[in-house]
Amino acid sequence: MARGHDCVTITLVHVLMIAFPAAVFATNCYVVAPGPGEECVIVDPGIGVEAQLAEVLAEHRLRPAAVLLTHGHVDHVYSVTPVCGGDTAAYIHEDDRYRLVDPVAGLDRGLVAMMEQEFGTRATWREPERVVTITDHETLTLAGLELSVLHAPGHTEGSVMFTLPQAPDDMPGAPAVAVTATCLSGDVLFAGSIGRSDLAGGDPRAMERSLRDVVLPLPDDMLVLPGHGPSTTIGRERTGNPYLQGLGA
């Protein structure tokens, strides 16, 4: 199991973004806000992020307004309920809503045992009290931010990407090119790869359509912040990602 505790703080134009990997599967968790002392949105709170997330919120004096989920796999949603509490809604695409009933139930028992050994507690699940279902091309106005929803099935039925019309001036590990917007791509698109489509609810043909019709039309100068691994750009993936070759736009 991967361990990751380093935060990356990204200053966007009028936007503060903090990124750090979860303790298991190194799922990237993102916190986005207009600035310190403001409301924020949290994207994909994975397994074991609660303590580090609380430190980030306290350090920057941030108040969660919403939790956005790129899809319903357990490594992206496991901490959503303790993060949400009773007042903060979790946003997920309508086609993945069913996954929030109990994402732990479908896990391999050996993996559950490893998680329990890692954290010293029994792996349990409770649905968030407030769940808002989202749809393709919906615009979410949350915490003073405007995020667009792009439905991109294939990894799961309800996988989405969230786009922001801002981009960082500088980000450790980011490609050394100018970027003008940001895409939180979940497990649709990675640097040099894509999300698996052979898991339950995955569909290789749907993934191919999502890459062709949703990913490729995005501008080359859009920064991609994926669910796992380092950042990239649409332009870099268009020319170098083998899964995008030959698809056309």
Image: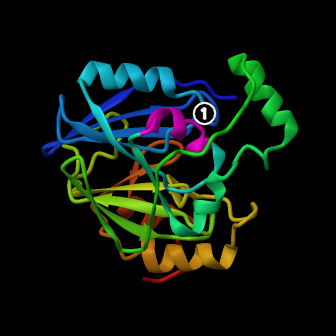
Taking the image as drawn, is residue 167 in sight? yes
Amino acid found under the numbered disc labelled 1: Ile
Name of the residue lying farthest toward the top = 120
Corner quadrant of residue 78: top right
Q: Residues within 10 Å of mark 1 (few under 14, many from 20)?
A: many
> Residue 237 appears at what percent x and percent y?
45, 61
Give the tally of numbered discs. 1
Residue under the image location 60 percent in, 72 percent down? 207
The span shown in magenta is 75-86
Vertical placement of 73 versus 4: above or below?
A: below
> Residue 133 appears at what percent x and percent y?
47, 64
Name of the residue lying farthest toward the left = 14
> Residue 136 appears at what percent x and percent y?
42, 74
Name of the residue lying farthest toward the right = 109
| Main SS class of the magenta portion in the image | helix
Q: Is residue 175 magenta?
A: no
Q: Is residue 78 magenta?
A: yes
Corner quadrant of residue 36: top left
Left or right of 170, for residue 215: right
Q: Quadrant of the N terminus?
A: top right
Left or right of 238, for residue 3: right
Taking the image as drawn, is residue 6 in sight? no
Q: Nearer the viewer, residue 79 or 241?
A: 79
Q: Which residue is mark 1?
A: 47
Corner quadrant of residue 16: top left
Q: Quadrant of the C terminus?
A: bottom left
